[in-house]
Amino acid sequence: MADLLDIDDPAEVLAAAGRSAVAGAAAVGRAVQTARHLVVHPRECSQFDEDLIARLDSLRGVVTETATATGVRSAATYHQVAQAIPALIDADAVGGRILGNVV
């Protein structure tokens, strides 16, 4: 079952961002680990095989670079959420004061 998120609670917003960042880091780790295992052991091969090996090397590089960039974005998103929490707390307090005056 999906986690319920109370957007009025800054701690829950930060916790959800943290869970997302941890899941992202785990996925990045798995992708990079998988890419590292995409190797062909040296042996005699045809030109066709050499071309395929070159493409595999290129693919491994793309997967590694993309996964690394995704990890950086995931961490940056968490930090941006953490920096936005004070604004969320202030907005919640202002909303509470407004509702307190209306009721």
Image: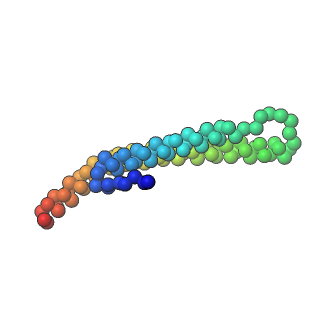
Could you tell me which residue is drawn at 40 percent across and 48 percent down? 17
Residue 96 percent across, percent down from the top left = 19, 58
- 95 sits to left or right of 4: left
- 69 or 16, which lies in front? 16
Q: Residue furthest front?
A: 1
Q: Residue furthest bottom?
A: 102
Which of 50/40 is in front?
Answer: 40
Image quarter (top left, top right, bottom left or bottom right) of the C terminus? bottom left
Q: Is residue 44 left or right of residue 75?
A: right
The residue lying toward the viewer, choosing from 66 and 103, is: 103
For the N terminus, the quadrant is bottom left
Q: How is the image coloured?
A: rainbow
Q: At 28% across and 51% down in the image, what residue appears?
A: 9
Does residue 72 appear in the picture of this structure? no
- Counting labels gives 0
- Can the viewer see residue 84 in this picture? yes
Above or below: residue 6 compared with residue 62: below
Q: Residue at x 80, y 46 (%)?
A: 51
Query: Is the residue 37 above or below the residue 87 in the image?
Result: above
Name the spot of residue 81 as percent of width and height, x first.
37, 49
Q: Which quadrant holds residue 32?
A: top right
Residue depicted at x 77% and y 42%: 53
Q: Is residue 27 above or below residue 6?
A: above
Q: Position of residue 69 (x, y in %)?
A: 54, 45
Q: Residue furthest top?
A: 42
Residue 15 at what x, y percent from top left?
Answer: 36, 46
